[in-house]
Image (spheres, rainbow, N blue to C red):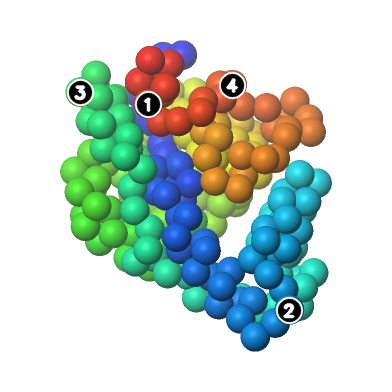
């Protein structure tokens, strides 16, 4: 791959959403007979079937989706070292993510904004993954051809498949609930699969 740009998803890719996820499940299932374990098991079933896990589980149990607690998110320990190493090798870095408003501010608070040349987040972009429009927007801002870019993310449906459809390269990181999904077609297969971000430095 002759890459110039590396684009990252945020949730379950650079950012650990574990505590925010737990809090939402607690709030959604409060005062019900649904346990956190039961919810997670059902979500996993839907993910393995190829559905978006949370929307399907919420609908199945008849729950009300509660607000997401972005304040409980935190970068994975290897996020900053990985970004720094890639930046030091001359790659340009960007973000393509479905996020609540305030992505740039959160990246600044996490001391990660310094590594990114382009940040395209759904709340501000007016488009959300897997819509190809948000990928095109990022590529246009970067002045980059799809073949010169790689998308790094945890989800097949939101990251790998739409990036591949546009001609971008793809790397899947097996973190978060999306790690349990297995590709069902060639179009869903990432070019590379890694267990954690640290592997990316040796891969690209």
Q: Which mark is first along the chain, 1 or 2?
A: 2
**Along the line of sight, the residue nearer the viewer: 108 or 26:** 26
The spot of residue 203 in percent (x, y) is: 43, 16
Sequence order check, earlier mark of 2 and 3: 2
Rendered image: mark on residue 33:
2
| First in residue order: circle 1 vs circle 4 | 4
- Please name which of the two marks, 2 or 3, marks the residue nearer to the observer: 2
**Mark 4 — residue?**
191
Q: Quadrant of residue 100?
A: bottom left
Q: Is residue 143 visible?
A: yes
Question: Mark 1 highlights which residue?
Answer: 198
Q: Look at mark 3 in the image and give the residue it sits on.
A: 88
Residue at x 34% of width, y 66% of height: 71
Give how far apart the Cα atoms at labels 3 and 4 are.
24 Å
Q: Residue at 78% across / 30% down in the picture?
A: 185
Distance between mark 4 and mark 2 Cα atoms: 42 Å
The residue sitting at 67% across, 61% down in the picture is: 37
Instruction: Kindly check if marks 4 and 2 are in contact, taking CB atoms under 8 A apart as contact.
Output: no
Is 94 rendered above or below residue 189? below
- Secondary structure state at the residue bearing disc 1: helix
């Amino acid at each position: 791959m002759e890459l110039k740009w590396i684009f990252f998803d945020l949730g379950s890719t650079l950012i650990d959403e574990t505590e925010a996820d737990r809090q939402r499940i607690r709030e959604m299932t409060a005062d019900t007979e649904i346990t956190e374990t039961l919810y997670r098991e059902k979500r996993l079933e839907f993910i393995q079937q190829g559905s978006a896990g949370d929307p399907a589980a919420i609908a199945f149990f008849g729950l009300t989706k509660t607000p997401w607690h972005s304040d409980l998110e935190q970068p994975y320990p290897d996020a900053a070292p990985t970004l720094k190493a890639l930046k030091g090798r001359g790659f340009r870095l960007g973000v393509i993510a479905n996020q609540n408003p305030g992505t740039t501010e959160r990246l600044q608070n996490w001391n990660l904004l310094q590594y990114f040349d382009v940040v395209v987040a759904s709340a501000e972009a007016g488009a959300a993954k897997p819509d190809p429009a948000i990928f095109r927007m990022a590529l246009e801002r970067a002045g980059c051809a799809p073949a010169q870019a790689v998308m790094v993310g945890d989800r097949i449906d939101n990251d790998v498949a739409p990036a591949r459809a546009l001609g971008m390269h793809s790397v899947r990181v097996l973190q978060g609930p999306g790690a349990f999904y297995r590709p069902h077609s060639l179009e869903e297969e990432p070019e590379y699969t890694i267990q954690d971000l640290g592997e990316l430095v040796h891969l690209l």
